[in-house]
Image (spheres, rainbow, N blue to C red):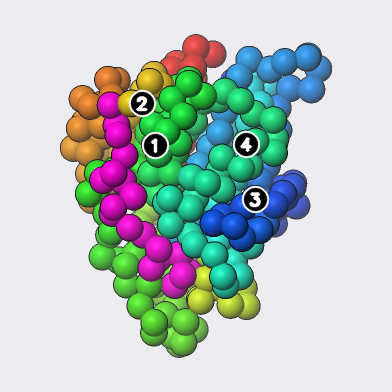
Amino acid sequence: MRAADPIDHQARGDEQAATTVTVDGHSVRMAYRDAGPTDREEPRDTLVFVHGIPTWGYLWRRVAPAFEDEFRVVVPDLVGYGNSSAREGFDRSIRAQEEALDGLLADLGVESFSVVAHDIGGGAALRLAAHQPGRVERFVASNLVCYDSFPVEFISSFGLPRTEGMDREEFVGKLDFAFAEGAYGEADPGFVEGMKAPWLREDGQRALARAAVSTNTNHTMEIPYGDIEAQLLCLWAEDDVMQPVEYGERLADDVGGEVVRLSDAYHWVPEDAAAEYRRELAAFLGV
């Protein structure tokens, strides 16, 4: 496992590729980063890192690159997020993200894989693991949505019609609250800037409103959790008030797995506790 010194968000975006996936019959552009060993015929495994709301693949800047010497590492931007299409006319729900993620992996020729997932990206990945259990070998669940753990009031507030026309200063203030005030200790300005950037583009406020209004508890309540066969690790920030660790414990009980509590971290656990997160993930993966 090598060091994972984060680069700035613009450079990370420049490294992304894109493909077209289908969501409810609509063709949607999906951005992703695909990196890993090129000096051997087959890497050990494919690791897929999935973000949630209101982040994008840059959430994993301090974690995912550390595993690129050993694994093929795929880091998508969910549809409607980051550098994926944020236009009108398609669903951004957890159910839709499952379909988009499945389409991306098919396009990349990935049959079996391990997943590291956060927030609503975790909800989409759980659906995929339950509906196609033979494909997901290992599952790392980090402060993800499951059962009835969401919507979160703060995120739901972005889904109100007034968000699209909100005063710019107020909108930026809400994003600062989410990313800067939501960090454990003093937030890295590069992280805050990177997380905010997609939503500060033209039509970004509308895009965030569409993403926020798409959160639907039914899409995680209907998951047949007992069908998940993946080896499970719940790598969970124990001080997160948005997705409490009790949900990770419930998931581990239902699926069968271990809960590792990370201290000194809130909801943005891959950023707040990056070094410990990398160590625990490496141990779970056997590297």
Q: Position of residue 260 (x, y in %)?
A: 30, 26
Residues in magenta, as a range: 208-226
Q: What residue type is labelled 4?
A: Leu
Mark 2 residue crowding within 10 angstroms, few (<14) / some (14–19) / many (20+): many
Residue drawn at 55 percent across, 25 percent down: 113
Q: What residue type is labelled 2?
A: Ile
Say which mark, if any, is on residue 105: 4
Q: Position of residue 122 (x, y in %)?
A: 41, 41
Dot 1: element: helix
How far separated are the C-alphas under marks 2 and 1? 8 Å
Q: What residue type is labelled 3?
A: Val
How far separated are the C-alphas under marks 4 and 3? 10 Å
Disc 2 or 1, which lies upstream in sequence?
Answer: 1
Disc 2 or 3, which lies upstream in sequence?
Answer: 3
Say which mark, if any, is on residue 228: 2
Say which mark, if any, is on residue 126: 1
Q: Name the residue under label 3.
A: 21
Q: Is residue 203 left or right of residue 233?
A: right
Disc 2 or 4, which lies upstream in sequence?
Answer: 4
Q: Is residue 7 left or right of residue 117?
A: right
Residue drawn at 21 percent across, 31 percent down: 249
Residue 167 among magenta residues: no
Residue 45 visible? The answer is yes
Q: Nearer the viewer, residue 20 or 282?
A: 20
Dot 2: element: loop
How far separated are the C-alphas under marks 1 and 3? 19 Å
Disc 4 or 3, which lies upstream in sequence?
Answer: 3
234 is higher (above) or lower (below) than 271: above
Disc 1 or 3, which lies upstream in sequence?
Answer: 3
Q: Where is residue 92 in the image (x, y as percent from the top left)?
A: 48, 60
